[in-house]
């Protein structure tokens, strides 16, 4: 049985047509769920009881469960338990421009980036679309906020769960759904090249962020095993294609690891890769984890790296930090829970 919170409006319309009902019922269901925030089919009062009974037979409305919460002034981090007792995390951040949420797309991750906490625990399974939608619904309810932007940057590699992630995007972007605009949805990937090509033809033009983290294949392959499959050259070709097809700016994420990738030479080498491309580099202060071989670059070094990129004509920002006091580095809550 599929979960009601993971079905696109179009599929719900098909469903209603299939049981001899008007497809407008799908809009009504979407309004109950996403506008009125009523999650129980019994309460969909403008839908006849017999149709509601049929809905109940065909759709499940179970919810993921909040089991732990950590918060500081601007950040709340949630640990959820799924129906099969697996755990995932999401973080909500209050910005001056609105509220953003960082959600997980898989239970664990197989990409194996050396500095990342999430990858310590291998992928158990993909999340289904409803489990991504429910991270938003549950947090909005618990925190009493309306989320204005969504980044798929929590546990997991979203492009390794392509179909469900695309379904999720379609649900939250729907005009009768949570109404998150395409420009407020970001997918972050370690660089699954074929999927970047696929993503470029998505009708909903979302933001793409690439976890880059190193200016050459030698270092990138050491830090990120995926680079042994898709080299920097192939990745940049895919990014260029994405830029050309979508006319969107792509974000290049670069986590600052002390004495690993943070030299002036590294900044120059990075700049040379992206000359003339419509990208910007987001420098991420490393959240220190149990990977003791990695430490955060000093503020000075981060600024020196920033200045060098600027001088080389690259747009660059330094990520504002949220939640360093509450283990918000992704995978930390789940990591503790699974010990
Ligand atoms: N798999 C996707 C999305 C999840 S990781 C991806 O690779 O983009 C989200 C981002 O956090 C990536 O850029 C990742 O490299 C970065 N990251 C992982 N561990 C981190 C840490 N301890 N501190 C700062 N950033 C980290």
Image (cartoon, rainbow, N blue to C red):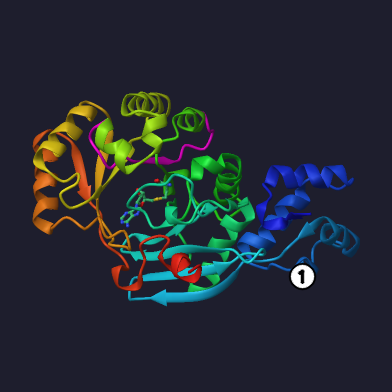
Q: Taking 117 as reference, is 169 left or right?
A: right
The magenta-colored residue range is 201-216
Residue 329 quadrant: bottom left
Residue matched to label 1: 43
Q: Is 80 or 239 nearer to us in this picture? A: 80
Q: Looking at the image, which residue is at 13% across and 34% down?
A: 268
- Image location (x, y in percent) of residue 246: 42, 29
Q: Is mark 1 within 8 Å of ligand 1?
A: no
Question: Is 163 part of what is drawn in magenta?
Answer: no
Image location (x, y in percent) of residue 24: 76, 48
Q: Position of residue 209 (x, y in %)?
A: 37, 42
Examine the rendering and report whether any part of residue 150 can be seen: no
Residue 52, image quadrant = bottom right
Q: Is residue 244 visible?
A: yes
Left of 194 or right of it: where is 282? left
Look at the picture and state if 6 lies above or below 242.
below
**Does the segment drawn in magenta span residue 202?**
yes
Asked if 140 appears above or below 183 in the picture, the reply is below
Most foreground residue, 338 or 138: 338
- Decide: few, some or many residues near mark 1? Use Cα within 10 Å; few <14, some 14-19, many ≥20: few
Secondary structure under tag 1 reads helix
Residue 4, position as x, y percentages in the image = 72, 56
Q: Residue at x 22, y 28 (%)?
A: 273
Q: Who's the residue at 52% across and 38% down the image? A: 204
In this rendering, would 293 be left or right of 81?
A: left
Q: Residue at horizontal 83%, vertical 43%?
A: 17
Which residue occupies the foreground of this view, 11 or 153?
153
């Amino acid at each position: 049985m599929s979960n009601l919170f993971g079905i696109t409006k179009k599929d719900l319309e098909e469903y209603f047509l299939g049981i001899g009902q008007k497809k407008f019922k799908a809009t009504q269901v979407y309004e109950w769920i996403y506008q009125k925030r009523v999650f129980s089919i019994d309460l969909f009062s403008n839908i006849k009881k017999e149709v509601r009974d049929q809905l109940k037979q065909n759709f499940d409305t179970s919810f993921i469960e909040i089991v732990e919460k950590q918060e500081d002034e601007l950040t709340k981090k949630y640990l959820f338990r799924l129906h099969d007792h697996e755990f995932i995390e999401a973080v909500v951040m209050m910005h001056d421009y609105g509220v953003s949420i960082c959600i997980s797309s898989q239970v664990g991750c197989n990409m194996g980036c050396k500095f990342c906490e999430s990858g310590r625990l291998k992928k158990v399974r993909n999340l289904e679309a409803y489990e991504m939608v429910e991270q938003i619904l549950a947090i909005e309810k618990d925190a009493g906020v309306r989320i204005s932007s969504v980044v798929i940057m929590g546990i997991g590699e979203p492009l390794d769960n392509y179909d469900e992630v695309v379904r999720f995007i379609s649900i939250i972007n729907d005009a009768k759904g949570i109404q998150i605009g395409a420009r407020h949805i970001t997918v972050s990937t370690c660089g699954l090249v074929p999927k970047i090509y696929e993503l470029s033809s998505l009708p909903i033009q979302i933001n793409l962020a690439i976890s880059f983290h190193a200016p050459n294949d030698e270092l990138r392959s050491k830090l990120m095993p995926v680079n042994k499959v898709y080299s920097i050259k192939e990745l940049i070709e895919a990014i260029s294609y994405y830029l050309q097809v979508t006319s969107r700016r792509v974000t290049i994420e670069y986590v600052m690891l002390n004495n690993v990738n943070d030299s002036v030479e590294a900044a120059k080498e990075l700049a040379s890769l992206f000359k003339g491309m419509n990208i910007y580099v987001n420098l991420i202060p490393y959240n220190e984890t149990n990977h003791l071989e990695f430490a955060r670059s000093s503020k000075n070094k981060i600024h020196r790296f920033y200045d060098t990129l600027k001088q080389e004509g690259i747009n660059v920002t330094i990520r504002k930090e949220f939640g360093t006091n509450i283990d918000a580095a992704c995978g930390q809550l789940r990591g503790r829970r699974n010990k």
